[in-house]
Image (cartoon, rainbow, N blue to C red):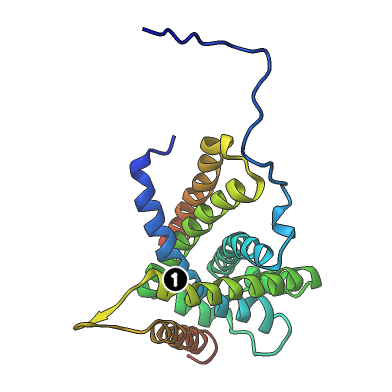
């Protein structure tokens, strides 16, 4: 019976995995879009914080609410919010476009086409946005 | 720190939060972050908003929106750090910081809206 001895060498074998740069996502447009979509999470979080700031200010009364409105009119706050809006919008669009892949709807024996699922998501977006705007502005 | 069995639940909340954030947040951000500050639309009075937020359904909806959106963001950001910066070895501390922030934010929103 052959005995296979294990030999340890001083030198570490070279990894077969190629090294990937930390900035791999800058190489291609599609990679950059991917990381932009991932980064949208930070702006989703900011949006929640901003909404909570408004709720807090309204709860503290008209004076605090006016102070918050003044603060929100500062150029840098508007810039942050415009960037946030773009990225949260990007999140929404990419999310709705991916919905058909995540959600397979069957009606009887036929699959509902992906385009219909995407379209219904966009329709829901329009309806929810209209309701939110109506409650806040017109209600 | 995060047990493997928690993963399906986290992905579920990620999906729910993704839908809710996409449906609700853009309009809220457009109104309060852009349209009102720039004077495109008349800013609602504090009394009107207090009446809107005072309704139990609004408060319930806001707590749900805040909670699932924050967990969505935490989950996605956790994977952004893994993939973007390739720091998988910091798995536990990243998960703790991401979900920890989401828990703090959710509890804060629930407290804020319960005591409104």
Q: Residue A63 sits in which quadrant?
A: bottom right
Is residue B36 among the parts visible in the rendering? no
- Count of residue discs: 1
Residue A19, position as x, y percentages in the image: 69, 41
Question: Which residue is nearer to you in this view: B29 or A73?
Answer: B29
In this view, the residue farthest toward the right is A75
In this view, the residue farthest toward the bottom is A138
Q: Secondary structure at mark 1?
A: helix
Residue A64, position as x, y percentages in the image: 64, 68
Query: Is residue B79 toward the left or the right of residue B12 in the image?
Result: right
Q: Is residue A137 above or below residue A20?
A: below
Which residue is drawn at the image coordinates 57% and 34% (left, top)? B89
Which residue is drawn at the image coordinates 44% and 56% (left, top)? B111
Q: Is residue A98 above or below residue B43?
A: above
Question: Which residue is nearer to you in this view: B66 or B114?
Answer: B66
Q: Residue B90 sits in which quadrant?
A: top right
Quarter occupied by the N terminus of chain A: top left
Question: Which residue is nearer to you in this view: B75 or A9?
Answer: A9
Chain designation of label 1 = B
Question: Which residue is nearer to you in this view: A3 or A125?
Answer: A3
Which residue is drawn at the image coordinates 20% and 82% (left, top)? A109
Residue A36, position as x, y percentages in the image: 65, 64
In this view, the residue farthest toward the front is A1
Q: Is residue B50 above or below residue B102?
A: below
Q: Residues within 10 Å of mark 1 (few under 14, many from 20)?
A: many
Residue B59, position as x, y percentages in the image: 41, 69
Q: Is residue A103 above or below residue B107?
A: below
Which residue is tagged 1?
B19
Is residue A78 among the parts visible in the rendering? yes
Query: Is residue A108 toward the left or the right of residue B38 in the image?
Result: left
């Amino acid at each position: 019976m052959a005995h296979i001895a294990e030999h340890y060498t001083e030198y570490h074998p070279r990894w077969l995995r190629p090294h990937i740069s930390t900035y791999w996502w800058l190489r291609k447009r599609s990679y950059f879009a991917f990381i932009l979509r991932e980064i949208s999470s930070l702006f989703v979080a900011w949006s929640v914080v901003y909404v909570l700031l408004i709720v807090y200010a309204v709860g503290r009364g008209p004076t605090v609410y006016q102070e918050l409105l003044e603060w929100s009119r500062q150029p840098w706050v508007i810039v942050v919010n415009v960037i946030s809006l773009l990225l949260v919008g990007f999140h929404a669009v990419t999310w709705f476009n991916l919905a058909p892949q995540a959600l397979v709807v069957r009606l009887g024996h036929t699959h509902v086409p992906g385009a219909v699922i995407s379209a219904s998501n966009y329709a829901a977006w329009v309806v929810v946005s209209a309701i939110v705007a109506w409650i806040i502005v017109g209600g | 720190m995060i047990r493997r069995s928690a993963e399906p639940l986290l992905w579920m909340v990620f999906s729910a939060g993704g839908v809710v954030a996409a449906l609700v947040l853009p309009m809220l951000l457009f109104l309060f972050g852009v349209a009102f500050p720039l004077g495109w639309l008349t800013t609602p009075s504090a009394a009107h908003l207090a009446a809107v937020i005072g309704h139990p359904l609004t408060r319930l909806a806001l707590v749900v929106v805040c909670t699932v959106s924050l967990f969505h963001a935490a989950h996605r950001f956790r994977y952004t750090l893994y993939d973007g910066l390739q720091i998988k070895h910091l798995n536990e501390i990243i998960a703790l910081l991401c979900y920890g922030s989401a828990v703090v934010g959710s509890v804060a929103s629930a407290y804020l809206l319960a005591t409104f």
